Amino acid sequence: MILQKVNQPQDLKTLSQEELLQLAQELRSEIIRVCAQNGGHLASSLGAVELIVALHRVFDSPRDRLLFDVGHQAYAHKILTGRKEVFHTIRQEGGISGFTKVSESEHDAITVGHASTSLANALGMAIARDTLGENYHIVGIIGDGALTGGMALAALNVIGERKPKLLIILNDNEMSISENVGALNRYFREYQTKKWVQDTQKWGKQVLEGISPRLFNLVDRAKEAAKLMLHQENPFYAWGIRYVGPVDGHDLPGLIHILEQIKELDGPTLLHIVTQKGKGYGVAEEDPIYWHGPPGFNPQKPEKVSKGYSWSAAFGDAVTELAYREPRLFVITPAMREGSGLVKYSQTHPERYLDTGICEDVAATVAAGMALRGLKPVLAIYSTFMQRAYDQIIHDIAIENLPVVFAVDRAGIVGGDGATHNGVFDIAYLRTVPNVQIAAPKDALELRAMLKKALELGGPIAIRYPRDNVEKAPEGAWPEIEWGRWEVLKEGSKAYILAFGKTLKYALEAAQDHPEIGVINARFLKPVDKGMLEALALEGYKLVTTEDHQKMGGFGSAVLEALNELGLKPDIRVLGLPDVFFDHGSIPRMHREAGIDAAAIRAALAEMGVSLQTVG
Ligand SMILES: CC(=O)c1sc(CCOP(=O)(O)OP(=O)(O)O)c(C)[n+]1Cc1cnc(C)nc1N
Ligand SMILES: [Mg+2]
């Protein structure tokens, strides 16, 4: 086993070419083994194995800085940089992160999880290096999906002008999570579709002329392509960036050779490598979408597993049905078709579906444009990724009170993806924006009711739901909902728990068998239901709010502000996530630690003197 001899990157310097090739295979086996037990970003990491071996062979981490965009493809990097003994803990409770993380290793140049940040970060590092008169290499490794992000494209614009010595590696596997989208992606597909360009170049014109005019034309196209390959129209040249490629991203000796050739070039160089997502593992090569981030599996007999009926599926079913009833409905996703439950919708309503690529800011303002011109856009977006569209929500949507519905998925702590992916700020950052309303359904039926009503009401409305399974709503069910009104789920004689989303189950659990404790489905978070709140306070009930969101600025804050406006001071406790980041791990454990679960609710009630007699 070569891997046994490798503990740090410098151990690669003495390996022979055969040993490096063997090492790549061993890395692949280890990534498959660990992803089989833990789940994780399998296909992306398999596709980057040769690249990472070549990088650590040619460059000297941690002196040289390797910046992995998104950081989900860096499993081989983690193994090669002193973490092979703990790699089996990846994404697990107390284990290493599934992304690169500065605080985890000196070899991790950036802490990531959100896409498209590596190039701006690399530019900043290059400026720091040059300003301080230091001398080391900086390499930004970015996928074709991440390159659809505005941050990445804008960074290229600055890099091309400032021209620091910087290597950018475009890892192009034609995939984001779904198939990749965008004009740049199309450019690379059309003009460097490797096979026919290489074939025609190989055959030569005279051979083809003798065969048939059709093939002759093929050569002309190849000539055209060659002209493009000579960068006549290559966009990177417009950005002032040297373009090298495309090259085979799995040809380890070739990669090492070319990296050694271009390593010392001055100014910014982009090396375009073409890889296969899932390389080296059949099922992942065949279906890089499912195997982008699978749950655990049997490595000898890998099979797709159903993760149950999720809130995302409930949303997808709802908009798919709604689109037949509402011809102006248009659904937008920023590169999260599968994650947002939109595969079926994209097939049944392709003419009213847009995947913008990984650019939430663009997606939000496209929705604004649609709304300004008579459509009813629904932007399907994860809470954490909606952070990228904050100014667009304010500036392009809320000021004019445009009818845009935000279907906010993954609201709350998400588990394995950790701090970069938790959806725990959206209530706070949306609540402060005038005209924006925020709702949280308790089940799939209520989600349908809210979606339908939101499209009728108009204005910017966020409907948020957690990463969780939910009971499927009957097809065709479109219940009404009293907009803005909370719902009493259980009467109480002394206290009420105000909850929504995942914490509703904690509230019902805390109140179970306790007649003195009532539960309210506080399904409208902005505006809160002041009428019901006033009645509860005036009748002297003790109140507990609980939310899977930062306490600061969350739902509980909204309730306190409303009580203050009402001039009421009931005995109340606000439970929410403390002012820290929650890393990857078990959601129930984090909820317990954060003090938002049933035990915490009961403790808060006891502390307010509500004795819990158990009945029944
Ligand atoms: C992990 C995660 O959240 C990923 S990985 C990924 C595809 C990246 O494609 P790329 O071509 O860059 O890499 P590849 O997988 O090797 O093909 C997306 C869209 N996401 C979700 C996502 C959405 N939006 C933002 C801002 N960041 C992230 N990370
Ligand atoms: Mg890709």
Image: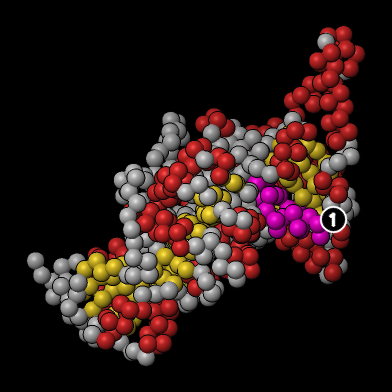
Q: Label 1 is placed on what type of residue?
A: Gly
Q: Quadrant of residue 575?
A: bottom left
Its colouring scheme is secondary structure
Q: In this rendering, is residue 161 above or below 30?
A: below
The one nearer the camera, 488 or 503, is: 488
Name the residue located 83 percent from the left edge and 10 percent from the top edge. 212
Residue 284 relative to residue 444: left or right: right
In the displayed structure image, the side of residue 109 where residue 258 appears, left or right = right
At 41% across and 87% down in the image, what residue appears? 565
The picture places residue 179, in percent across and down from the top left corner, at 60, 39
Rendered position, 500 above or below 534: above
The residue at 87%/18% (across/down) is 204
Secondary structure, magenta segment, majority class: helix
216 with respect to 67 (left or right): right
Q: Which quadrant: the C terminus? A: bottom left
Query: Mark 1 sits on what residue?
Result: 160
Asked if residue 48 is among those painted magenta in the image, a careful observer would answer no
The residue positioned farthest toward the top in the image shown: 210
Report which quarter residue 487 is drawn in: bottom left
Could you say which quadrant of the image residue 513 lies in? bottom left
Relative height, residue 87 to residue 383 (above, below): above
Does 142 lie within the magenta span? Answer: yes
Secondary structure of the residue carrying tag 1 is helix
Q: Position of residue 376 (x, y in %)?
A: 53, 54
Q: Is residue 267 visible?
A: yes
Q: Which residues are magenta?
A: 139-160
